[in-house]
C-alpha cells in the first residue's frame, strides 16, 4: 500500500497518537481499489520536528513528508493524524482535493464550544425551555 501509480489519486493517511500507522492496513485495504494509499508511519519520531504544545512541528513534519507526493491528495487521518493533516491543509490547500477526519478530538472541542454546540447542549438539557424562549429546537435536533 505504498507505491504510487500513474493516473490514480493518492490517499495519504496519518495515524493517531500512540497507534502505529500500519495498524490501519486492514481498515484502509478496501480503499486501495480506488486510490494509491500511503500510510504515514512514525509521525512525531523525527528529532528535527520536536513535539510541541500545538502540534505545529508535527504538521511541519507531515508537510515535509507530503511535499514530494503527486497532487492533489486526499488527506485522511485518525485523531492526532487528522488534526495535523488539517493544519497542513490550512497552509497548503492547493495540495488537497479532500480531507477525511476520523474522531478528530480538536474539531469536536471546537464544535462543542461553538454556538451550534451550545445549542445542542441546550437541547439535551431541556427542549421545552428552548421552546418557551422562542427557539425551535427541531432543526438542531435533526442536524445532531
Image: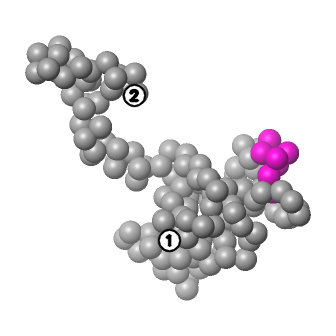
Q: Say which quadrant the C terminus sits in.
A: top left
Can you see residue 143? yes
Residue range in magenta is 29-36
Examine the image and state in which quarter residue 140 appears. top left
Task: Give the number of the disc on residue 40.
Answer: none
Residue at the spot of label 2: 144
Q: Residue at x 74, y 71 (%)?
A: 69
Q: Position of residue 57 (x, y in %)?
A: 48, 76
Q: Residue at x 11, y 16 (%)?
A: 132
87 is within the stretch colored magenta: no
- What is the total number of numbered labels drawn onto the structure image? 2
> In this picture, is 67 found above or below 74?
below
Chain-order first, disc 1 or disc 2: 1
- Is residue 29 found left or right of 123 in the rendered image? right
Task: Give me the C-alpha separation between circle 1 and circle 2.
Answer: 30 Å
Task: Give the number of the disc on residue 91.
Answer: 1
> Which residue sits furthest right?
6
Answer whether labels 1 and 2 touch (C-beta < 8 Å): no
Amino acid at each position: 500500500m505504498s507505491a504510487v501509480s500513474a493516473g490514480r489519486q493518492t490517499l495519504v493517511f496519518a495515524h493517531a497518537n500512540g497507534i502505529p500507522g500500519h495498524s490501519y492496513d486492514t481498515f484502509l485495504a478496501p480503499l486501495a481499489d480506488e486510490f494509491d494509499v500511503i500510510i504515514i508511519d512514525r509521525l512525531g519520531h523525527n528529532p528535527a520536528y520536536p513535539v510541541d504544545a500545538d502540534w505545529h512541528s508535527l504538521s511541519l513534519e507531515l508537510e515535509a513528508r507530503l511535499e514530494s507526493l503527486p497532487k492533489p491528495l486526499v488527506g485522511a487521518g485518525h485523531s492526532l493524524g487528522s488534526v495535523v493533516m488539517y493544519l497542513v491543509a490550512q497552509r497548503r490547500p492547493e495540495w488537497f482535493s479532500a480531507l477525511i477526519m476520523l474522531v478528530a478530538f480538536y474539531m469536536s472541542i471546537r464544535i462543542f464550544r461553538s454556538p451550534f454546540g451550545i445549542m445542542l447542549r441546550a437541547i439535551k438539557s431541556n427542549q421545552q425551555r428552548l421552546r418557551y424562549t422562542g427557539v425551535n429546537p427541531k432543526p438542531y435536533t435533526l442536524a445532531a
